Amino acid sequence: MRRLTSGLKVVSLNSQLAFMRRYSGLLRVLPVLTVTAAACLVGCAKAITTSSSAALVQLDVIGRGRAEVEAFFGSAFLSGFDLHIFPHRTDLDRFAHDRWGMASTECWMVAMGSGSGLVLLDPSVWSTEACEHDGNDAKHVHQIVTHELVHVFHGQHCPNHEFDGMDEVGWFIEGLAYFAAGQLDEEGVARAGKAAKRGLPHSLATAWSGESRYVLSASLVAYLDRTRGRATLLSLLTATNARELLERLGTTEDRLLAEWRADLGRG
Ligand SMILES: [Zn+2]
């Protein structure tokens, strides 16, 4: 879900975007090698791995997502990060195989983020090479990219940059990304309320499971944000397990779940 890659080093995304805007007409018709060279002209350590000039359009989406994430946390990314935009599923599969030993990626996997960077399957091929995602829906694409950039931001702050073995706080990792990316809409809030009435989640560790995992996890994070504040949320980014997280919140799992459930009941 969130892991990463090497590729275009976004040392300075702003200068890169300025460059892309300046040469956007030209880049649309540039062949692969020239695109690679153009990307490196603006400070990348490695080359962007894409043969699709259309994928460069995503740099603008990524730039906007990055600004949103920084505005949400009131703080900048700690460093540049790697960026890989794959023009086709086969390229993503090849990368996932080489990097993570995966035989292939699932059709719903269109983007991944962690402390080391962002991987994106070009949204222009989602209609034919992905499922459950609409690459023509600009808002949806923007939220997906922003969601993964929250993982990048989080991973940069977390001592465990790739979130390896952090399944017990999966609710915080995924809930934070879903909430900060603006994906928890009114319908999601209502679904979380209904699931909570059915007694879900049974524990924090199981909040990130089942069909309501995104809305339940995001509802918990939204509750923390509203009651503890954004600065507290930021302070939780360095927690690597449930004990650390609850200690920083000064509460217990049972108390947190009970107060969140009571709050939902009032709403
Ligand atoms: Zn995620």
Image (tube, grey):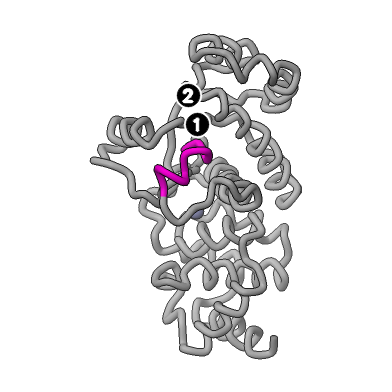
Q: Which residues are magenta?
A: 121-130
Q: Quadrant of the C terminus?
A: bottom right
**Residue 147 covered by magenta stretch:** no
Q: Which mark is residue 114?
A: none
Callout 2 secondary element: loop
Q: Which quadrant of the structure image shows residue 203?
A: bottom left
Secondary element at tag 1: strand
Q: Which of marks 1 and 2 precedes in the sequence? A: 2
Specify the amino acid type for callout 1: Ile
Does residue 120 appear in this view?
no
Q: Residue at x 58, y 85 (%)?
A: 261
Question: With 192 as the anchor, is 162 left or right in this view?
Answer: left
| Side of 224 where 125 appears, left or right | left
- Residue at figure coordinates x 56%, y 51% from the top left: 238
Asked whether 157 or 175 is in front, the reply is 175
The residue shown at (55%, 78%) is: 191
Q: Residue 253, position in %: x, y? A: 50, 77
CA neighbours of label 2 inside 10 A, class few (<14), some (14 to 19), many (20+): many
Look at mark 2 in the image and give the residue it sits on: 50
Residue 85 is marked as: 1
